[in-house]
Amino acid sequence: MNKRYLLLAGIIIALGVGILFMPAKDTAKQTQPALLLAAIDDPSRFLSTDDITDRLVKKDPALLLIDVRPASQFKTFSIPGAINIPVDSLLSASAQETLNQKEMDKVFYSNADVTSDQAWIISKRTGLQRIYVMQGGVNQWFSTIVKAEKPAETASGSALELYQFRIAACQHFFGSPEMAATPKAGAEKKMVKVVKKASGAASGGGC
Amino acid sequence: MGVIPETWNNVIALLLGVGFGFSLEASGFSSSRKIMGTFFAYDFVVLRVFFTAAITAMTGIFYFDYMGWMDMSMLYINPYYVMSAIVGGIIMGFGFALGGFCPGTSFTGVAIGKIDAMVFSGGLFIGVFIFSELYPLFQGLYNSQNMGNATIYEMLGMKSTVFGFLLIVAAVGMFYGAAFVEKKVKKVEY
Amino acid sequence: MAKNKRDGTFYINPYLGGVLLGLVLFSTYYITGRGLGASGAVKSSVVSAVHTVAPAHAEENKYYSKFLSDDASPMSNWLVFEVIGVIAGGFLSGTLYGRLKFKVEHSPKITSRTRLIAALAGGILFGIGSQFARGCTSGAALSGMAVHSASGIITMLAIFGSAYLFSWIFKRLWI
Amino acid sequence: MEELNKTNRLTITVAVIVLVIVTGLITLRRPEVKYTLSPAESLALLKDPALVVTPTQTVALLKDSAGTTVFIDVRNSVTFDRGHVKNAVNIPVRELFSKKSKTVFHDVEKAGQTAVLYGETQQQANGPWLMLLQTGYRNIRLFTGTYAQISAFSDSLTLLLPQFSETPGIDTVALRLISSPVATNKNDASSVKKEKKSVKPVKKQAASGGGC
């Protein structure tokens, strides 16, 4: 047998032994601290409430809104189509099943964007992909979409356009305020039902 | 992984393809009889090249990952659909025994003018076409038992490093065995 | 030695070939984050060919439509360029070692015609099988093994295991 | 002879690979920062009220001259130069794991002090705070208000509202207008966090015209 082959076999086995001593990557998909910090410093994870609304109105099937607030707050009010994963149960098996897929953009939101951002950081660390945070949270969503403020007469065209869009979106979700009483009950119930299913499919529109 | 800008993608693909094609052809993968030698134990070139390539790439990935030059967990891992993978593998094995090529090697055969390789590649297109047309029939099997982007060491419940080491040892053992068997078996001229 | 090299019988040391192939595979992983492939290119071309000939049919078919997206033509796929490279690389090596020649390679026991029919049948089966397994020997088995993909290793075992069995049935075709 | 020649080239190729790997190992620098908490442990810490500082609590800390608290400003250096909390240390987000920052946190820990992280908003300091917790620091607290609040500091507490960015700010009046009785049945108070005490929802004052 060729001596060189023995040498080569020796080299590859030595490299293999080297591999054996490497720290096992059992925490495999974890994002390293330095990389995670860089990701935190990068604002591209934030999606504006208007963007989200636009995608909700268009019934974007690749959008999954995740409400990380406690269940009680979620019941009081939630963005149509959102599912509830309180931040405490973020790492539970059922929540991970919903979150760990690459087909949809998962957007976390809370009242502001602190809790949702915490959920994002932990999720990013565990290696989830296509995750985002809704900037300003549901407070912002409510005050811009539901209670959209009419821009001043002198405002630019784009500001007026945005206002029109917001009004239209709100009507899309809740109908007009006059007929709020009866037909809304059905819509609200439907929304709650979607929550109970808590399936990944519940993305489009709750209303 | 974004080391190189998007616009260069196709150029890079071409260059890597050239490297791929060259190493396949130069090792003799453009000859179907040389490939089939592995199954009749007169020429173990496929086994040698295949496993050397796998352990080289694997070792490289392990060390580069350790040194932080690349991130192993970011690498794409084929989704594992149990039945679909096994059935597909058996069908391919049958095709392998008949045709004597696999897609990559048949393209190198085409490059040097092997007519059987050209026919084989033509067959590939027809095969994919047939599959797509009959997809509704196969859909159930194709999508059953999805295990996600599973890795073998997770399934076996061992550490990735241990598996890597075992693979290297197994490969070296196989090389030794191949050389041993080759000596015993009557040479076939091709 | 130098003369030998050009008569078409010279092949590089299989281990050197393996190391080179391994380096190419490794570079592919390093640069793109995914492995090599060959059957993917076939799929892309079939999808785009069908889409050109019968767009409505392609969009209707559940399998084609999986790979059709509005913005990118499936032909502009990474793998297609890679396969063009494979052919170029094979040609380069064939030129270098003097193997360029039109011929049908077959066992002395069978005719060229038999060989071609077997090759066509083999190609069709391989085409179908590669779709089931989501990759062929290069895409699933070789690339999969480098990253310990369960799918790749199972596919590899299935391919080589069954090929070993079937090859004894079709022994006449080869030796 | 030919066989030998073939092997020779192989040996050279392998030697080059080994050389690359060895060079890599020699020049290798392991990342200095490591997680000491699992994701689940980090998640559990988020609920710990001892790790956050509300604006009200900050009043005491700002007045405190004993030096038990070090304010860390995570905004960029330009903004920091324009104005900051007295004696605050500037550690912009991206420099959190730099050597200099490490000494700062190390000194704070050694002196038995507590670091309070603040940013333009609570959100800005949130990320660095969570990173520090995950990498092993325990004496780091997060300021739950905005820089505007802390800079406008006076003894008057009113300037320091609201206490948490995460306080529910849904205008329940408007909500009642647009949504079903199901939602209206809920007591307004149920939508309000416990820690809120007497604080009113942020946006409530703005409640004017109904919804859409």
Image (spheres, grey):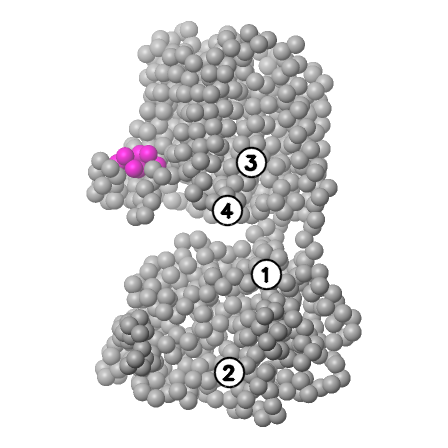
Q: Nearer the viewer, residue A115 or B168?
A: A115
Location of mark 2 (residue) = D193
Q: Amino acid at mark 3?
A: Phe
Location of mark 1 (residue) = A37
Labels 3 and 1 positioned on one and the same chain: no
> Of helix, strand and loop, which one carries label 1?
helix
Residue visible at 24% across and 44% down in the picture: C60
State which chain disc 4 sits on. Answer: B
The residue carrying pointer 3 sits among few (fewer than 14), some (14 to 19) or many (20 or more) residues within 10 Å by Cα, namely: many
Q: Nearer the viewer, residue C168 or C33?
A: C33
Cα gap from disc 3 to disc 1, whole angstroms: 28 Å
> Seen from this angle, which residue lies furthest bottom?
D156
Work out which quarter of the rendered image holds the N terminus of chain D and state it: top right
Location of mark 3 (residue) = C26
Which of label 1 and label 2 is nearer to you? 1
Q: Which residues are magenta?
A: C44-50
> Of helix, strand and loop, which one carries label 2?
loop
Q: Amino acid at mark 2?
A: Lys
